[in-house]
Structures are given as C-alpha cells and as structure tokens.
Image (spheres, rainbow, N blue to C red):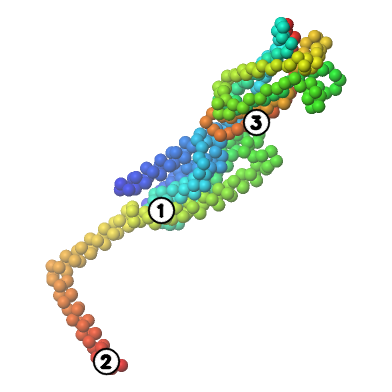
Amino acid sequence: MAELKSRLGAFLEVMMYSLAGSVPVAAFFILAFFPGYVPFSITETGTILILTPLLVGVLFGFMLSERDLRSVAAGTLVIVISSSVLVTAFIMSPILAGVASAAPAVAPGEVLEIYIAQRILLFIVLSFPVLLLGAVVGRALSERVVPSEELRLELEQLRKETREWHELLKSKGGLKEKSETDVPDLNVKQEDDSAKPR
Amino acid sequence: MNRVRALLLTAYLVIVVVGGVIYVQSLSNMVLYTEADQKFPSSIYVNEVRIPRYAGVQDYSIICSFRFENPTRVPIRLRAFSFEIAIDNGAQGNPYEEVRLTSEKIGGAAESLGDAGPLIDPGGKLIRSYAMRVPAADSSLMNHLNANGNYTVILYGLAVSYGYSGTSLLRQFWPEAMTVEVAPIG
C-alpha cells in the first residue's frame, strides 16, 4: 500500500511538472508563429523556438532529480502532447467560442484539419528533440547540483562508514603498519622480477 | 529542500506563469479579434453627402462623411481608407458597372493613417469627412438629376484597412458600393 502510494505520488509529481511545463512551450510557439495575437512582438522567432523548450527541459530535468530517467523522458512526452493540445485549442478557439465558423488562421482554400496537423507536426519536430535534450541534461546536472534525497543519504552513509574505518584503523595503528609493510614487499617483488633470467 | 532547488523551482514557476499569461492573452485576442473581423466590416455607413453651391463660385463642392461604428469588444484602429465617388447619369443598365462608373466618376479620396490612425473604442463611433472639388470644366458630370430632382451619388471602390491597438495585425476589406440620394443646395 505504501509503495502504491509512493508510486502514485511520483506519477502525480511528474504529471504536475509536465502539464505546467507545457504552458510556456505552447505559449512561446504561439508567440513565434502567431505574433499578431500576442500583446508584444518579438523578431527573434528562431531563438524563441529553440531556447524555450531547452530552458523548460533543463528546469524540468532539474525538478525531477529524484525520479529516474524514464520518468523524465515520459514527462517530456507529456509536455509535447499537452502543448499540442493547447496549440490546437488556440487555433480552434474562435470556433469553440462560437464567434466564427472557420478558424481565421486558415486560408479559405485550406482544410482546417490539415492546417492543424501541419502546425502540430512542425511543433513536435521543433520542440520535442530540444525539450528531451534539455530534460536529460537537466536531470544529469541535477545529480551534481541538487542530488536526490536518496543519493544524498547514501553518500552520507558512505562517508560516515569511511570515517569510522579511518578512525578505527588509526586507533589500532593499523594504517601506519600497513603502509610500512606494503612498500618493502613491493620492492622485494620488483627485485625478484628483475633477477629472473629472460 | 535546498537553496538551489528552491531557486530552480522558482525559475520554473516564473516561466510557467509568464507562459500562462501569454497563452491566455493570445487566446483571448484570437477570439476577440476574430469576432471583430466578423462584425466590423458591416458597420460602415455613409453619414452624410452634401453638394453645396456657393454664390460666385463655378466649381462644385462635395462633402462626404462616413461613420465607422465599432460593435465589437476591442478598440479598432483605422489605418487606411479610400473611396471613389460618381454621380449616376440615369442611363439604363447596371449603375455599378465598372466602365460606367469610371465615366461618371467625379472624384475620390484616400488616406493612409498607419499607426497614427484614430482608435474607435468598443461601442463607439468615428466620423470621417472628406471634401472634394469638381472643377467647372467637369460640370457636365453634375448635370444629372434624377426624377426627384436630386443627385444619385454612388460611393464605390471603398477600401478599409484596420488593426488592433498594440498588435501588428492588419486587416483589410472592401465594402459594397453605396448609393445616396442628395438634394442640390444653393
């Protein structure tokens, strides 16, 4: 029961971060491709298209530092799917709101479904690889910068055990004796090896 | 939670909030602008046409004003407007036929306002007046009164460009020709 609860918690955490991450990815795609509807204009659309998924991906990877890499990849997929839904909702919003019978972005001779499919495909092609790369990099960096609680505890335990060993060896004088006995042995071995006929 | 993680979480939330604001604003603009594009083109009317004659002046004057109403929920900026004006000669056939209108044309006006164009508030209206002079040499065009003793003025070739405040969107439409009966003054 406890394991199920922990798994559900992990799933919800990944979903929450993924759904939240899909909002800026979709928004900046709209900013780049439908600039007339955004309250401000940006000329660097290419930079926006590359940097936003990368930044969101890196931060997303960092946020999931306590989850495994499969969860990060699955979360990236959720971001792309939910962003696609948001972009589709944006294109179809006048129809959904009942103010128009056709989407204004679609030219009169164009089919709405094909137009949406083209945009979504373009969106996936542009954003998914960058998003995934960012998430993997973010996840990898997080192990160094913000290690997971589990890893941190393991490292702490290891350090503690090592310290105890050192103290134990020092108290018995084992460390000194060991170093003194090791070196002559090696020398003897080397001498023996060189003395052997070739 | 350590400090670095808290900082990154804050950055993530900031991006999410900024993205959310942009998304909601864009979605709202998409709906409102589309609605405006449906309603605004049918909200342009001829407000008044006058053809006054002044004592001692051989030329004809034509004063024409249009009323732009904004029935939408967003402010609309008029960016350009142009039209041509003709006086129907009363001949048989289609009064809106292009060659005929060209032969009856007495003038026109065009103005390009761009970003400095007037803003029409939601529910508000804008009246733009244009004055033209028909030289005495073209007075033959003005000698066509209809059966009621009035001029049949045709306003055609109308072209309207408009946009929305704060965006780069530019819309254009071409209203149908309008006919107005005008009593001669003076």
Q: What's under tag 1, amino acid-wise?
A: Gly
Q: What's under tag 2, amino acid-wise?
A: Lys
Classify B58 as above or below A186.
above
> Which corner quadrant of the image does residue B47 belong to?
top right
Q: Chain of mark 2?
A: A
Task: From the top left corner, tell me how far across and down residue B156 is, in percent.
Answer: 73, 23
Residue ID at (16%, 65%): A167
Mark nearer the viewer, 2 or 1 = 2
Q: Nearer the viewer, residue A55 or B186?
A: B186
Alpha-carbon distance for marks 3 and 1?
47 Å
Residue ID at (21%, 83%): A187
Q: What's under tag 3, amino acid-wise?
A: Gln
Task: From the top left corner, tell me how far across and down residue A133 is, in percent.
Answer: 46, 55
Residue B169 is marked as: none
Residue bearing mark 2: A196
Q: Secondary structure at mark 2?
A: loop
Task: From the top left corner, tell me how far across and down residue B149 is, in percent.
Answer: 80, 9
Classify B56 as above or below A152.
above
Q: Are marks 2 and 1 in contact (CB under 8 Å)?
A: no
User: Can the viewer see residue A181 in this picture?
Assistant: yes
Task: From the top left corner, tell me how far across and down residue B10 is, in percent.
Answer: 37, 42
> Crowdedness of circle 3 by 10 Å Cα count: few (<14), some, many (20+)?
some
Discs 3 and 1 lie in a common subunit: no
Residue A138 is marked as: 1
